[in-house]
Image: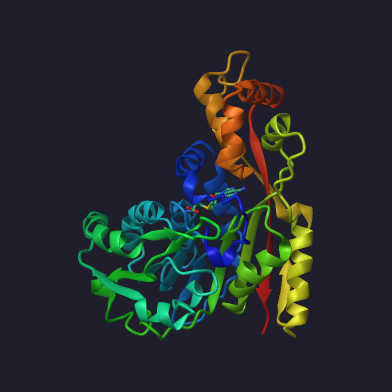
Amino acid sequence: MSEEKTEPQKDQPFRFFDNREKYLLFVTTTSEKSVTAEKVGEELKFLTPNPPALRLFDAGVGNGAVFSRVLRDMHSRFPTVPFLVVGKEISMEDTRLWLETLADRFAEHPQTIVVMTNLYYAEAPWLEPKNPADREKLEWHDVALDGTTAHDFSQEIGKLGEKLNRGWQTRSSPITGNPLYVTPSVLVLYRRDQAFAMHDIIPRKGKFDANFDLIIAAQPYRSRTDAKFKVKKVLGPLSDSLSVNGRMIVVQSTGHDPGMEIIRKVWPTEEPFATPRHILINTLKESFVESGNKQYSIEGTGDDSALFTYHMHALPDEIGSNIGTSTLLAAWNAAVYVAQIDDERMNEVLQLGSYLDATRSVLQRHGGLWFQDESFVVVRRS
Ligand SMILES: C[S@@+](CC[C@H](N)C(=O)[O-])C[C@H]1O[C@@H](n2cnc3c(N)ncnc32)[C@H](O)[C@@H]1O
């Protein structure tokens, strides 16, 4: 997600990518991944896959937890439909974690093709860089996995380290400091014993139509970026890659939660969430009108279906008068991660120490910590 072409220029670079430990602590101490996957799962009942495959795109896979959960859900609903699933991820470490989630998916659902790419939003759904020089450089790896069991596939996937090391290098943008790909890369994985049956579905270099039945766009941009930018650089191109009747679920934070209370105790005027969904939806609709595109409708915008919460895991007796330091640190970490506070501002506060008091008082007041997200769905009509 953190890439020059999707981020406005700022004199103070901020990168999710830099905040690796924050991300890993956040995803292991909260229910964000499972709750997001459940929310995405609600869309599956609306899908009517067209032969030859059900096509999914994840616009920022991270550690692969949402991706693999959604694939499990898809298998239970469509056990015999071939899956063509594409994910975009620029972080090599996240791509490695994502790879580790895939072995049992190939075992349970043999007709699965997983495509991993580090391309930008406007490129990734089509598996092709826009710029001709980058197109020339595109590294395309076609990997047929040998074996029949999850263990076999895990062994096979374990051999891909070298391809990741080469293909997923990044460099810093001199303008924003954000990571950019050094080599545009695509890695196509499937079971060798299914290669004949899936011959016409396996993507080939330069020959791929997007046409996704479902797109997951969960927190795919910096929250402070303005709506026009988010629409032009992320949601617009992704909408273009939907099939007829395809659905894109967009998920973002609202800040209406105890997490934001912690933030405001430390930075009273902080406003991290610049584009509440109604602003984003209006901007997206305007862009559809401007481009003369009447095919899209937007669903699930009312509070009842849009709002949902996830929480920080804690034992029942953990949040009392005496909250352990590790719980406080996990809570603080989740709050600053969600509010996308940059490291420089964090460091000023860390030296003061009062951030732990602020966190403790919010946890005690609410008996725990939770965050509110909102979603909406873009549907492409015929
Ligand atoms: C920030 S990226 C993940 C890291 C990414 N691999 C990277 O290196 O840039 C998107 C993921 O962050 C998590 N996330 C949740 N709330 C977020 C928020 N408010 N801002 C940013 N990321 C959030 C979600 O798990 C989401 O899928």
Q: Quadrant of the C terminus?
A: bottom right
User: How many numbered marks have been drawn onto this rendered protein structure?
Assistant: 0
The chosen color scheme is rainbow
At horizontal 54% and vertical 38% (from top left) the residue drawn is 30
Rendered position, 192 above or below 35 = below
Q: Image point 55% across, 40% down: which residue?
A: 343
Q: Quadrant of residue 328?
A: top right
As drawn, is 256 to the left or to the right of 55? Answer: right
Does residue 221 appear anywhere in the picture?
yes
Q: Nearer the viewer, residue 187 or 308?
A: 187
Pick the front one: 317 or 167:
167
Percent across and percent down for residue 153 are 25, 59
The image position of residue 371, as x and y in percent, is 65, 40
Asked if residue 370 is positioned above or below residue 13 in the image, the reply reads above
Q: Is the residue 136 above or below the residue 249 in the image?
A: below
**What percent of the width, then of the height, locates residue 198?**
33, 79
To which quarter of the image does residue 300 belong?
A: bottom right
Q: Is residue 315 visible?
A: no
Residue 86 higher or lower than 268, as above or below = below
Q: Position of residue 217 (x, y in %)?
A: 58, 62
